[in-house]
Image (cartoon, helix red, strand yellow):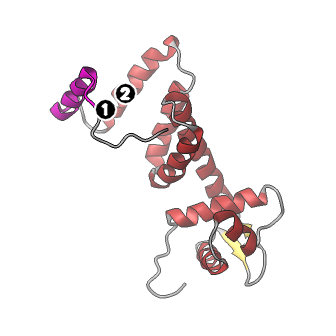
Amino acid sequence: MPRGRKKVLTPTLEDYLVVIYEIQQKQPAARISTVARKVGVTFPSVTNAVRRLADLGYVDYEKYGLITLTTKGKRKAQMMLVLQRRVRNFFHYVLGVSLEAADKIARHLSHYLTARTRERVKEFYRIIINFDKSKAEELEKFIKESRNLVNVTELPQEVLEDLAAIEKGEKEEEEQEGD
């Protein structure tokens, strides 16, 4: 790996892993050209990313050869896809965001969730995705657990003020986007 390059899996590299995984669901291995076409970048960009993924142990790749995910790479790609699907479904089916917008949100957000946060998302998803009255107590318990995790017994004043503003129907100062 060239000097100055950190040996970490960046969000961009995670995206490449997912693309390679998706390609490998249809054929035994990926090629630089196929990945470049699917991602919409140049061959050198893909080659650089694939070399970095190989250095990190996520793919097997030889110059001008095929790209295959290692067991580690396959596990990581599958985990990213499951997380993205859950986040997308939450935004789409619970918040009513368009599927296209929910997909974008999920792809970006999923990169920044720690293992602990992923577990909390999974538990919240389990409760809320098919919510009915029978799950109200479970949701209340989950929220109490969440607040305990961050040592909050009462909501801060700024949160209460924000809630009051929402209840009054004050308009958001943010630009409205079509979801």
Crowd class of label 1 (few under 14; some 14 to 19; many from 20; radius 10 Å): some
The residue positioned 52% from the left and 67% from the top of the image is 9
Instruction: Give the label on residue 127, or none.
Output: none
Quarter of the figure with the N terminus: bottom right
Looking at the rendering, which quadrant does residue 46 occupy? bottom right
Looking at the rendering, which quadrant does residue 48 occupy? bottom right
Q: Amino acid at mark 1?
A: Arg
Identify the secondary structure beneath mark 2: helix
Check contact, mark 1 vs mark 2: CB within 8 A.
Answer: yes
Q: Position of residue 98 (x, y in %)?
A: 55, 37
Q: Position of residue 143 (x, y in %)?
A: 37, 27
Q: Which residue is mark 1?
A: 147
Q: Position of residue 103 (x, y in %)?
A: 57, 45
Identify the secondary structure beneath mark 1: helix
Give the camera-side residue of 142 and 177.
Answer: 177
**Residue 134 appears in the rendering:** yes
Looking at the rendering, which quadrant does residue 155 occupy? top left
Q: Say if the magenta span includes residue 168.
A: yes
Give the camera-side residue of 166 and 59.
Answer: 166
Would residue 30 be found to the left or right of residue 177 on screen? Answer: right
Would residue 102 be found to the left or right of residue 54 on screen? Answer: left
Q: Position of residue 29 (x, y in %)?
A: 80, 67
Instruction: Give the label on residue 143, or none.
Output: 2
Q: Identify whether 123 is placed above or below 44.
A: above
Residue closest to the far right: 27
- What range is drawn magenta here? 156-171
Q: CA distance from mark 1 to mark 2?
A: 6 Å
Q: Amino acid at mark 2?
A: Ile
